[in-house]
Image: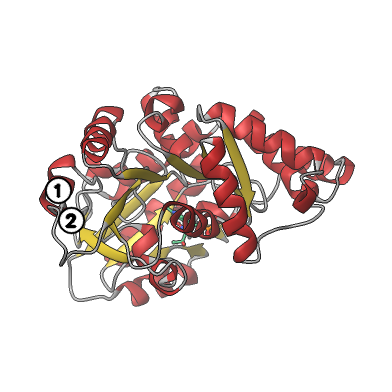
């Protein structure tokens, strides 16, 4: 099977398995796991923050960030298409107890002008707005990159109004590799950043949440609250270290394959694909033709040995990853053409 459902399907590398087998471990709830400590220090340094905390998933990292930034009843500004709002089982409301003020991020970028529109004046009727959440790259936008300049504008506006900025940077290394801009140029315009080790970087499990020391101390307590205090987690962290040290640069291959795929299918009848949005490892397109639903399309692909996903009843998503070769891309282009024919 050619599996384009997500970059989360990537298997750990041999080097990761080796590192996991040999990892020095301790009880991380006591702060005594040397591999976790090393991963947290490495990750924090790479994104230019003081400290980081290792969490089980991107979803947990975002939730813990909300818990550490806000009090129940406060409001956050978050894209209506953002993962935090759309794909995290409503944890923001159910667990963190915050009100989501939904911003228009359909373009794949939450612009400062949109944040400005949603700011509230001081008034006793209003909930207190505490946080702006950004996403880079933007999953439902189709893997789009928010530039450092766009992030700076949001960050400065947030600052002026006493709001913090959290970045869902699940794929922030994709943004950096795609643009050639160091990752710190993006993350410097945030108060906290969550990034995933288990997507294109191929670690089996885990994400990091980074910020100031004081923020990370609060995040550690929040992680405990949601049951995320792990013990000899160094066996997982060891793979995460390999992910950060060895797997970042190769994301360029995934981007090249996504581009190849997008260019190969963009002109086909019955789909609409905006090539401008294909900036990293995600290819999203709309089925416009004879009313074939996304489910039907996915089923026909599956019959040809190809797995993909959908983002709505008419929108298909394909995500390139380490296991997808150029040859696979050619196979997929041919299969899509046959299905649409
Ligand atoms: N996204 C998954 C699915 O949940 C949709 C995927 O296959 O793309 N932020 C962003 C931007 C994400 O894309 C994801 C995962 C997460 C957070 C959550 O990470 P995990 O899956 O580790 O909880």
Is tag 2's residue or tag 1's residue first in the polypeptide sequence? 2
Q: Where in the figure is residue 30, as x and y percent of width and height?
A: 79, 49
- Locate the C terminus by quadrant: bottom left
Q: Camera-side residue: 296 or 170?
A: 170
* Residue occupying the point 52% across, 56% down: 64
* Quadrant housing residue 338: bottom left
Q: Is residue 44 above or below residue 286?
A: above
* Residue occupying the point 38% across, 36% down: 190
Q: Where in the figure is residue 43, as x and y percent of width and height?
A: 60, 34
**Dot 2 alpha-carbon crowd within 10 angstroms: few under 14, some 14 to 19, many 20 or more:** some
* Residue occupying the point 38% across, 59% down: 83
Q: Camera-side residue: 33 or 334?
A: 33
- Locate the N terminus by quadrant: bottom right
Assess whether mark 1 and mark 2 are in contact (beta carbons under 8 angstroms): yes
Could you tell me if residue 78 is visible in this image? no
Q: What kind of element bears circle 1?
A: helix
Of marks 2 and 1, the one in the foreground: 1
Q: Camera-side residue: 265 or 60?
A: 60
Q: Where in the figure is residue 36, as x and y percent of width and height?
A: 74, 42
In the image, the residue with mark 2 has its CB under 8 Å from the nearest atom of ligand 1: no
Residue at which label 2 appears? 104
**Dot 1 alpha-carbon crowd within 10 angstroms: few under 14, some 14 to 19, many 20 or more:** some
* Left or right side of 303 for 267: left
* Residue occupying the point 76% across, 53% down: 29
Q: What kind of element bears circle 2?
A: loop
Q: Mark 2 and mark 1: span between their CA atoms?
A: 7 Å
Residue at which label 1 appears? 114
* Left or right side of 98 for 323: right
* Left or right side of 285 for 14: right
């Amino acid at each position: 099977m050619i599996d384009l459902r997500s970059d989360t399907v990537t298997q750990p590398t041999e080097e990761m398995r080796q590192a996991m087998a040999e990892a020095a471990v301790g009880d991380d709830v006591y702060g005594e796991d040397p591999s976790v400590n090393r991963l947290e220090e490495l990750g924090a340094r790479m994104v230019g923050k003081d400290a980081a905390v290792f969490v089980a998933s991107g979803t947990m990292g975002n939730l813990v960030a909300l818990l550490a930034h806000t009090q129940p009843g406060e409001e956050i500004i978050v894209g209506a298409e953002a993962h935090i709002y759309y794909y995290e089982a409503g944890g923001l409301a159910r667990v963190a107890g915050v009100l989501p003020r939904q911003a228009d991020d359909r373009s794949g970028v939450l612009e400062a002008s949109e944040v400005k529109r949603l700011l509230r004046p001081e008034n006793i009727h209003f909930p207190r707005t505490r946080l702006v959440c950004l996403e880079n790259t933007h999953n439902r936008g189709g893997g789009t990159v928010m530039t450092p300049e766009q992030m700076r504008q949001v960050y400065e506006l947030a600052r002026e109004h006493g709001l913090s900025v959290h970045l869902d940077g699940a794929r922030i290394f994709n943004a950096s590799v795609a643009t050639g801009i160091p990752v710190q140029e993006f993350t410097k315009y945030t108060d906290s950043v969550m990034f995933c080790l288990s997507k294109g970087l191929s670690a089996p499990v885990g994400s990091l949440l980074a910020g100031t020391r004081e923020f990370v101390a609060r995040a550690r307590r929040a992680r405990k609250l949601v049951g995320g205090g792990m013990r000899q987690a160094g066996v997982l962290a060891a793979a995460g270290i390999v992910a950060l040290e060895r797997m970042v640069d190769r994301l360029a291959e995934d981007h090249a394959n996504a581009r190849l795929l997008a260019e190969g299918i963009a002109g086909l009848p019955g789909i609409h694909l905006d090539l401008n949005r294909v900036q990293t490892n995600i290819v999203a397109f709309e089925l416009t033709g004879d009313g074939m639903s996304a489910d039907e399309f996915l089923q026909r692909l599956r019959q040809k040995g190809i797995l993909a996903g959908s983002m709505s009843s008419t929108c298909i998503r394909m995500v390139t990853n380490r296991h997808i070769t150029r040859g696979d891309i050619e196979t997929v282009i041919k299969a899509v053409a046959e299905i649409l024919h």
